Image (tube, helix red, strand yellow):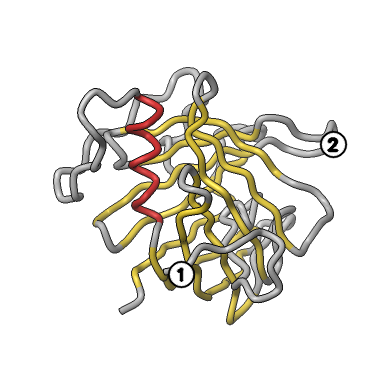
Amino acid sequence: MSTHKPGRSSRMCTMCIVIGLPIALLLASGCRAGSRAEHPVNPVLRPVNAPAGASQADIDRAALARFVGVWRFDGWSATPDGKRTSASGHAAGVIESEHFVLLDLKTTSGQMGGRAGRKSGSMIFASEPGIGATLTAWGDAAPSITRLVGRVEGTGSAFWFSEAKTPKDRHRHTMLITFETDNAWLAEIRDDTAGGSPVVASYRFTRAE
């Protein structure tokens, strides 16, 4: 699969799972960042393919390869009045510049809620030395970029992110992505500002055959 460039007109726009932030793709049982337990290793997943003696950043970077491929997704996001709106579509994840994974997503039914995308969006996953796992997202809903910082958990079984900075009038969101199998993963976004950190969006991705 060839790599994509963020500005290419030919690229398939993505799932910014955060695409829908506040979609916000996950699941801390309502706990805040400082107190949540790390996600356990999922034994059904393929082992992370990292070279011997690799740094933790390199191991985490290798885990990002789980997002590479063509995916179908469906799920929902919450509206301000608490109702759920459904969305489904497809996404493609590719290695970008050797160190990153670019995930492009486009809805085919409904629209994603949130700041980062309505019909299409993109996310770049990275493992940045000294910072941790990062997720940068943008979409067609607003002229802004969302940046989240977090960590890889359970040897690539889960990826947890929290918005690094939000405007004063916006709620901060967290995202937990959990891989159920190598061919299916769940992205859940929580409103970390509201009491109880309620889930405000949930999307499930399955590998397209």
Compared with 14, 35 (above or below) is above
* Quadrant including the N terminus: bottom left
Q: Nearer the viewer, residue 48 or 53?
A: 53
- 138 relative to 169 in the view: left or right: left
Q: Nearer the viewer, residue 136 or 159?
A: 136
The circle on residue 169 is 2
Q: Nearer the viewer, residue 109 or 71?
A: 71
Of labels 1 and 2, earlier in sequence is 1
Q: Amino acid at mark 2?
A: Asp
- 46 relative to 103 in the view: left or right: left
Q: Position of residue 128 (x, y in %)?
A: 52, 29
Compared with 86, 147 (above or below) is above
Foreground disc of the pair 1, 2: 1
Q: Residue at x 35, y 68 (%)?
A: 206
- 60 relative to 137 in the view: left or right: left
Q: Residue at x 19, y 50 (%)?
A: 46
Give the class, few, some or many, for how many residues have Cα within 10 Å of label 1's Cα (few <14, many ≥20): many
- 44 relative to 84 in the view: left or right: left
Q: Amino acid at mark 1?
A: Phe
Q: Position of residue 147 (x, y in %)?
A: 66, 39
